[in-house]
Image: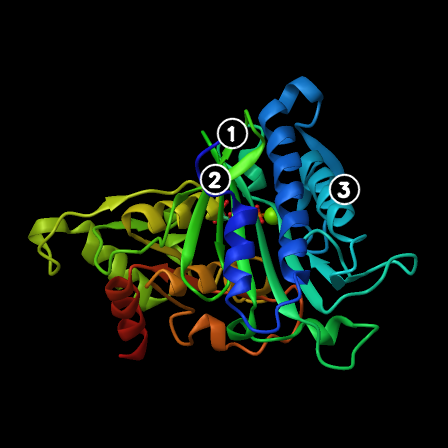
């Protein structure tokens, strides 16, 4: 027996407070939790179970897929397709949406996910994660198409991530704050360890891949330059820098101790608005960050207000401690 609150208990209690809740959503979350436990186990065993290395294929974005990208995508789909809660799924690793196969009942939710984010870190044994976002399937739609997924982030019902780090954690929001759960492997349950997570409004830590510096726009150049000047510069304070190259790990750090994360617009490839994907990365993370008191913007627009145009759309992302994000946004406005 454990004495903590399990994620299942937490969700059931949260749903009970909502009039008209059917238990459907609780059950969907249970399937997601199960998928994350399976992925955690695979990531944890790594080379012992032969899952490291490349798969020899490319995804729709033209990126080389890792074996674990492919395997975890399969795990997420198989865990979530059968129970009758979803109408369709969209994955970073799939060209098209995945409608629920005809042998299963269709439900009222749509789910978008990145089964293994930060996959360049798998082979070097650095933290990776899974990110997911749930929206309601538009009223009256039984055979959803790509277009039905193009719902702005501010309509998400739930967003979350699993972080496969020194411990495996699940962090969730249903629009009522952010809560973190740690996987207790001995009992196989995620236990509430980080209730009501809050991002401090101020920070002295930034995260950006500076190898792209020559491609950044002027406002981001200015912000980073001012941080680098430290005590002697206009900010009058020394800044620290981190870059894990796993967005889940960066967002988690920011939820724990504050910070700003940027994958900004740059002119490296004029065909791409940024690196990160709106549906699988930017929207769910922005929902979590805002629910924890932080802010999230492209530099010009609040991410949750963007009307998506394509399921694989990319956007610039600047998120984290509110006052720093607002500063970068104000530099864009000048
Ligand atoms: P992925 O979904 O293909 O793993 O790419 C997303 C990742 C993010 O987790 C991370 O913030 C970023 O890509 C790192 O990019 P870079 O390698 O350019 O620093
Ligand atoms: Mg990925």
User: Disc 2 beta carbon < 8 A from ligand 1?
Assistant: no
Image point 31% across, 72% down: which residue?
329
Quarter where residue 136 is shown: bottom right
Confirm or deny contact between disc 1 and disc 3 (CB under 8 A): no
Q: Secondary structure at mark 2?
A: strand
At label 1, counting other C-alpha atoms closer than 10 Å, the crowd grade (few under 14, some 14-19, many 20 or more) is few
Q: Are marks 2 and 1 in contact (CB under 8 Å)?
A: no
- Report the residue marked by disc 3: 57
Helix, strand or loop for disc 3 = strand
Q: Is mark 3 within 8 Å of ligand 1?
A: no
Q: Position of residue 222 (x, y in %)?
A: 25, 63
Q: Label 2: which residue?
A: 191
N-term-proximal mark, 1 vs 3: 1
Q: Could you tell whether 216 is left or right of 328 in the image?
A: right
SS of the residue under disc 1: loop
The residue drawn where x is 56% and y is 67% is 157
Report which residue position mark 1 lands on.
1
| Residue 257 shows up from this direction | yes
Q: CA distance from mark 1 to mark 3?
A: 45 Å
Residue 265 visible in the displayed image: no
Q: Position of residue 31 (x, y in %)?
A: 68, 48
């Amino acid at each position: 027996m454990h004495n903590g609150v399990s994620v299942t208990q937490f969700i059931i209690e949260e749903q009970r407070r909502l009039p008209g809740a059917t238990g459907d959503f609780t059950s969907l979350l249970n399937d997601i939790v199960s998928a994350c436990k399976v992925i955690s186990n695979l990531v944890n065993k790594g080379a012992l179970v032969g899952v490291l290395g490349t798969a020899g294929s490319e995804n729709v974005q033209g990126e080389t897929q890792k074996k674990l990208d492919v395997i975890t995508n399969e795990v997420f789909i198989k865990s979530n397709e059968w129970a009758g809660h979803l109408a369709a799924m969209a994955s970073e690793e799939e060209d098209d949406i995945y409608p629920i196969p005809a042998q299963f009942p269709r439900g009222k939710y749509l789910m978008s996910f990145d089964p293994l984010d930060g996959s360049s870190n798998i082979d070097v044994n650095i933290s990776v994660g899974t990110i997911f976002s749930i929206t309601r399937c538009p009223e009256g739609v039984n055979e959803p198409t790509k277009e039905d997924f193009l719902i702005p982030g501010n309509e998400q019902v739930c967003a979350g991530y699993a972080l496969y780090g020194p411990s495996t954690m699940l962090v969730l929001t249903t629009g009522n704050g952010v809560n973190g759960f740690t996987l207790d492997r001995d009992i196989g349950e995620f236990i509430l360890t980080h209730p009501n997570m809050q991002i401090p409004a101020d920070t002295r830590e930034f995260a950006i891949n500076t190898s792209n510096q020559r491609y950044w726009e002027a406002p981001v150049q200015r912000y980073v330059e001012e941080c680098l000047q430290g005590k002697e510069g206009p900010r009058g304070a020394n800044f620290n820098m981190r870059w894990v190259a796993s967005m889940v790990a960066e967002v988690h750090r920011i939820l724990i101790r504050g910070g700003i994360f940027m994958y900004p617009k740059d002119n490296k490839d004029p065909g791409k608005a940024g690196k990160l994907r709106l549906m699988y990365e930017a929207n769910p993370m922005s929902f979590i960050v805002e629910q924890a008191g932080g802010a999230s913007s492209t530099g010009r627009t609040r991410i949750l207000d963007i009307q998506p145009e394509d399921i694989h759309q990319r956007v610039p992302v600047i998120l984290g401690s509110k006052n720093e994000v607002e500063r970068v946004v104000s530099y864009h406005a000048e």
